[in-house]
Image (spheres, helix red, strand yellow):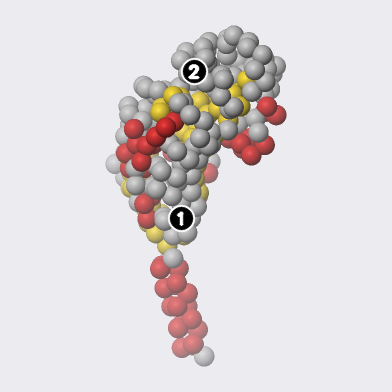
């Protein structure tokens, strides 16, 4: 009986090992946190609070991340306040990624996003980016958000609509959206000093909340 129990235990342990993959994080003090996660993991958060599940007390101390490519079913990534990561090129190989959320990050270079061929939702909140993003190089993009970032220029170059249904530029200082206003795209321009055009696809509501102006399927991103 005891032999049977030991064999079952070893089989379970082996199964767990086979179905796990390593994610490694380097912190500011030079230490490394290595965490084994289910190889079928579809969502990983590097955000305050939720990162505690990875034994990281504060994601703001992260300087490097390695091993995300070990999760072939990874669909969604959140980065919230990781100011010491200056290079996000480690994301380039994540060709299954569909949702990418950045909060309070300053980027040196944004070109890595063009290798994310499956990307459908791209969100920047309180971020700094040094160039306009070219939507033609993100063929599956359907929702784009760049909010709370003190922008004065429209952040997305759109030549043709393709799959884009909603662009959220709330809480900025953008005045001119003429490059996009005649396309059949919902533009949420809450708290921007843009000229009112009468286009029903442009929402410029200036009340205290715009949560319900955002299509229901994207409300989980509203900050």
User: With 76 as the anchor, is 220 left or right in this view?
Assistant: right
Query: For this rendering, which residue is in front, 31 or 106?
Result: 106
Which quadrant does the C terminus fall into?
Answer: top right
Of mark 2 and mark 1, the one earlier in the sequence is 1
Which residue sits at x=42%, y=73%? 14
- On the image, the x and y values in percent for residue 126 come to 49, 24
- Of marks 2 and 1, the one in the foreground: 2
Residue density around tag 1, few if under 14, some if 14–19, many if 20 or more, within 10 Å: some
Find disc 2 in the rendering and name its residue.
179
> Which residue ends up furthest to the left in the rendered image?
30
Q: Where on the picture, by quarter, is residue 105? A: top left
User: With 87 as the anchor, is 74 left or right in this view?
Assistant: right
Give the Cα distance between marks 2 and 1.
36 Å
Circle 2: element type: loop
- On the image, the x and y values in percent for residue 16 come to 45, 68
Which residue sits at x=40%, y=68%? 18
Residue density around tag 2, few if under 14, some if 14–19, many if 20 or more, within 10 Å: few
Which residue sits at x=58%, y=30%? 166
Can residue 190 be seen at all in this image of the molecule?
A: yes
User: With 90 as the anchor, is 193 left or right in this view?
Assistant: right
> Which residue ends up furthest to the bottom in the rendered image?
1
Query: For this rendering, which residue is in front, 193 or 176?
Result: 176
Circle 1: element type: loop
Find disc 1 in the rendering and name its residue.
73
Can residue 80 be seen at all in this image of the molecule?
A: no
Which residue sits at x=60%, y=15%? 191
- On the image, the x and y values in percent for residue 135 come to 44, 31
């Amino acid at each position: 009986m005891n032999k049977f129990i030991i064999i079952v235990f070893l089989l379970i342990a082996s199964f767990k090992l086979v179905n796990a993959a390593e994610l490694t994080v380097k912190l500011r003090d030079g230490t490394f946190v290595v965490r084994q996660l289910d190889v079928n993991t579809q969502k990983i958060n590097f955000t305050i609070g939720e990162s505690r599940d990875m034994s990281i007390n504060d994601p703001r101390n992260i300087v490097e991340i390695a091993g995300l490519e070990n999760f072939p079913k990874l669909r969604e990534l959140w980065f919230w306040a990781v100011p010491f990561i200056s290079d996000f090129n480690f994301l380039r190989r994540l060709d299954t990624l569909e949702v990418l959320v950045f909060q309070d990050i300053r980027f040196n270079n944004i070109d890595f996003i063009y290798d994310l061929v499956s990307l459908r939702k791209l969100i920047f909140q309180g971020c700094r980016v040094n160039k306009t993003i070219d939507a033609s190089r993100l063929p599956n993009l359907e929702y784009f958000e760049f909010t709370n970032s003190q922008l004065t220029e429209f952040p997305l170059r759109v030549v043709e609509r393709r799959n884009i249904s909603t662009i959220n530029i709330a809480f900025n200082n953008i005045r001119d959206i003429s490059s996009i206003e005649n396309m059949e795209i919902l533009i949420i321009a809450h708290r921007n000093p843009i000229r009112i055009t009468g286009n029903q696809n442009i929402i410029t509501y200036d009340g205290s909340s715009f949560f319900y102006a955002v299509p229901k399927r994207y409300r989980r991103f509203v900050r």
